[in-house]
Amino acid sequence: MSAQINPSILAADFANFERELGHIASADAAHVDVMDNHFVPNLTFGQPMVERLQAVSPIPLDLHLMIEDPDRWAPDFAAMGVWSVTFHAEAATAPVTLAKKLRAEGARAGIALRPGTPFSAVEEILGSFDQLLIMTVEPGFGGQRFMAETMPKLRQAHEFAKRTGLELQLQVDGGITTDTIGIAAEHGADTFVAGSAVFRGEPAEQIEALRQAAAQ
Ligand code: DX5
Ligand code: ZN
């Protein structure tokens, strides 16, 4: 599979989302960071906002829920017709049940791990998921430094998927730039979330540069 680039609109102009989504139309999906000010110390988009983004986006939405009690809230997001919904392993009470509900709503089910959470936390339940998100920064804010210490966990996930024949998309999120994307690709990632690296310059050019850097 060729590298997928999912720009994070956390780094976009919050007054112009429709226009900003147009600027990243050449990407594979728009990554939407939903934060509730409890699971992480930051607050971003609620359901009415995501509903509007879904209505106007030219590309699929890849939701990253950094919220408490995803068991309660995640299915409502999936029901909006988004492409994928990823919730945090640290926050969910019944992750497999929740994954089933997300899939029943037609969304891909994703599970995310904070940098400090080991792969063993999800190893036994991965068969219920379509994607695994390995956080490469502490969730909450854009523009942080890539944590190379998460790479052994990424490789572990990649090896596990290969060994067990799991069709699992492996996503990395945080500090991804043309300098770091190659390292993540080497360790088995196939989907790359990038916020500041995309919106800091001309988005279409940055997306292309990231694609090329991932392939090298
Ligand atoms: C952080 C978010 C990321 C963030 C990445 O909690 O999950 O998606 O937008 O931003 P950059 O690419 O700037 O590190
Ligand atoms: Zn994210």
Image: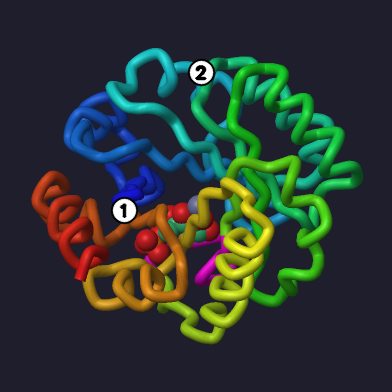
Mark 2 highlights which residue?
51
199 shown above or below 95: below
Q: Which residues are magenta?
A: 134-143
Q: How many C-alpha atoms fall within 10 Å of the one at disc 1: few (<14), some, or many (≥20)?
A: some
- Quarter-wise, where is residue 190 in the image? bottom left
- List x then y, in percent, for residue 31: 43, 42
Q: Quick check: marks 1 and 2 in contact, CB under 8 Å? A: no
158 shown above or below 37: below
**Residue kind at label 1, given as amino acid type:** Ala
- List x then y, in percent, for residue 200: 19, 58
The prevailing secondary structure element of the residues shown in magenta is loop
131 shown above or below 60: below
Q: Can you see residue 131? A: yes
Q: Which residue occupies the extreme right position in the image?
A: 93
Which residue is at 75% across, 41% downward?
128
- Quarter-wise, where is residue 20 in the image? top left
12 vs 103, nearest the viewer: 103
**Residue 17 is inside the magenta segment:** no
- Quarter-wise, where is residue 129 in the image? top right
Mark 1 highlights which residue?
3
Q: How is the image coloured?
A: rainbow
